[in-house]
Amino acid sequence: MPGSNAPATIVISATVPQGLRPRTIGAVCPPVPVTWLAPWDGLAAAATLVDTAAGSDLALEVPAGAFDSWHRLRTLLARGREARPELTAIAVRGPAALEHRGLLVEEGIRVVLVDSLPAAARGSRRPAPGGWRCRNAVWGLWEVEHAAVRRAGPLGWLGLGGMPGLRPRSLAVLRTEGLAPGNAGAVSISTRLQRWLAWARRHVDRGAAEAVTLQQLAARLSGDDQAAAPRSVLRAA
């Protein structure tokens, strides 16, 4: 986006606890879009968050070790698609070599959220905007690195310590635990996520940033802004 005052881009992702049942989810209405992350057996509960909060989307959490085996990775993706047929995003926690990228593309995955981009010889087939920690290692698939947010000290405990600075046209991709126990056995947005959402909303309200989902970010990187329009669920590109 041209112009020295062009807004920054914010992506907030939040993990859904394992074992969560849809009926335990209270009113969850984030003020900006959120990408909810869940393992394959938690996608049904996480889908409740997507379906009740317009603009949010969903990503399948995949263990880093799954990339050691083509068969295991394909099985996890198949299970995820059984729970959410329109799934196009995954998230990987921990160091992963991200082998079998071709399989990801074949299975309709368009974006992968990672802890870090490996310093590998393989470059990006399609360049990302300057300073954005993203890579298009194979056609049809973007790898996106989330920012490391320091948690030391009282500000870190509150979810504010080490928040990335937002310069015009910069990208901030954040990942945190999303839900916490609430009243009567229900769960609600965690304190940390609430503060991160408020931080993002302030920047959006000032016109200094745009908040998008992982799917919308991938569509923007690919130049397919029509696919980046806000929606309540992920659909295959």
Image (tube, rainbow, N blue to C red):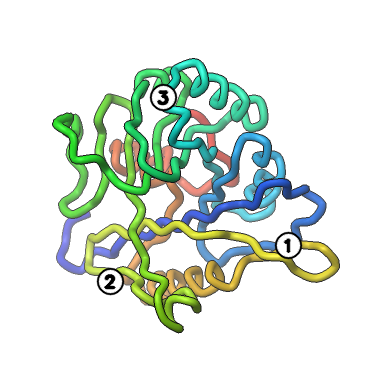
Tell which tag, 3 or 2, sits nearer the viewer: 3
Residue displayed at 41% across by 19% down: 103
Which residue corresponds to mark 3?
A: 68
Mark 3 or mark 2: name the one nearer the start of the chain: 3
- Residue at mark 3 to residue at mark 1: CA–CA distance: 34 Å
133 to the left or right of 152: left
Q: Amino acid at mark 2?
A: Gly
Neighbour tally class for label 3: few under 14, some 14-19, many 20 plus, Cα within 10 Å: some
Mark on residue 211? none
Q: Residue at x 37, y 66 (%)?
A: 149
Which amino acid lies under the numbered mark 3 shown in the image of this protein? Asp
Q: Position of residue 189 (x, y in %)?
A: 63, 65
Query: Element at badge 3?
Result: helix
Q: How far across and down, in percent of the image, does residue 111 sit?
A: 39, 37
Quadrant (top left/top right/bottom left/bottom right) for the C terminus: top left
Q: Position of residue 115 (x, y in %)?
A: 36, 48
Q: Is residue 85 above or below residue 143?
A: above
Q: Which residue is mark 2?
A: 165
The alpha-carbon separation of the residues under discs 2 and 1 comes to 30 Å
For this orientation, the residue located farthest to the right is 184
In this rendered view, identify the residue nearer to me: 60 or 228: 60
Up/down of 211 relative to 37, above or below: below
Residue topped by disc 1 = 187
Q: Is residue 153 left or right of residue 124?
A: right
Residue 183: quarter of image: bottom right
